[in-house]
């Protein structure tokens, strides 16, 4: 192959790689939700966190090069009762002064194996470090990717959702065990703006 053809081929290859670069999405807290449930004397009780920050990097060509980083300010807890919210923020539960945020930072992402009969999928196993109440534990999430679209403002938006369970005792939150359940069910639904 002549030198000019080699240079042209290398240029086209590098342009193709640039086109395939990963997309970065900044989480939009206005269009994202973090909802949790816990049993209280055997009945499910629900609350939410009103703020979530973070970045999702998604590489369509190679999802293993993707990443997720989330930060949830504990002060944003909302159970529709100010007195209860203050107790949750206090030292008996989240201890927001000492541990102001909970975080998740991915360490590995891989497409979920497809069930029989499916030829394509948009669900990913996302393994990472989850930190709550100052204690970091490994956690694997199953995240289902949502659609992607250009909205009226010209922004490109995409999102995803995951549902998982953690034990608060694993993170040193043991107050009122028995009256309040140990397992916390969490739903994180995210929407981000492409940067």
Image (cartoon, helix red, strand yellow):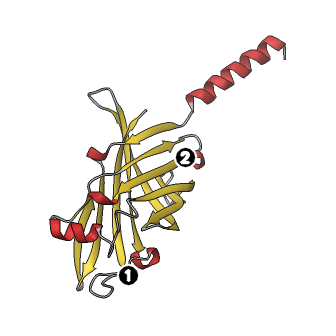
Residue 14 appears left or right of 150: right
Q: Is residue 54 visible?
A: yes
Q: Residue at x 47, y 38 (%)?
A: 24
Local SS, label 1: loop
Q: Position of residue 142 (x, y in %)?
A: 46, 61
Residue shown at 33% from the left, 54% from the top: 189
Q: Position of residue 42 (x, y in %)?
A: 24, 85
**Tags 1 and 2 in contact by the CB under 8 Å rule?**
no
162 shown above or below 69:
below
* Quarter location, residue 1: top right
Q: Quadrant of the C terminus?
A: top left
The label number, if any, that marks residue 174 in the structure image: 1
Residue situated furthest top in the rendering: 4
Distance from Cα at disc 1 to Cα at disc 2: 35 Å
Label 2 residue SS: loop
**Image height check: is 195 above or below 172?**
above
- Closest to the observer, 80 or 184: 80
Look at mark 2 in the image and give the residue it sits on.
66
């Amino acid at each position: 192959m002549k030198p000019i053809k080699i240079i042209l081929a290398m240029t086209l290859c590098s342009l193709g790689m640039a086109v395939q670069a990963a997309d970065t999405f900044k989480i939009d807290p206005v269009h994202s939700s973090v909802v949790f449930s816990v049993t209280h004397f055997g009945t499910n009780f629900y609350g939410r966190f009103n703020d979530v920050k973070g970045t999702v990097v998604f590489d369509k060509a190679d999802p293993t090069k993707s990443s997720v980083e989330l930060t949830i300010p504990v002060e944003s807890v909302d159970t529709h009762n100010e007195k209860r919210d203050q107790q949750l923020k206090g030292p008996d539960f989240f201890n927001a002064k000492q541990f102001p945020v909970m975080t998740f930072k991915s360490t590995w992402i891989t497409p979920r194996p497809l069930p029989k009969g499916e030829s394509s999928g948009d669900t990913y196993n996302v393994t990472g470090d989850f930190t709550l109440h100052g204690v970091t534990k490994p956690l694997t999430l199953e995240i289902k990717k949502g659609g992607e679209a250009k909205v009226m403002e010209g922004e490109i938006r995409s999102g995803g959702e995951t549902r998982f369970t953690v034990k608060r005792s694993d993170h040193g939150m043991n107050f009122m065990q028995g009256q309040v359940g140990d397992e916390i069910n969490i739903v994180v639904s995210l929407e981000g703006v492409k940067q």
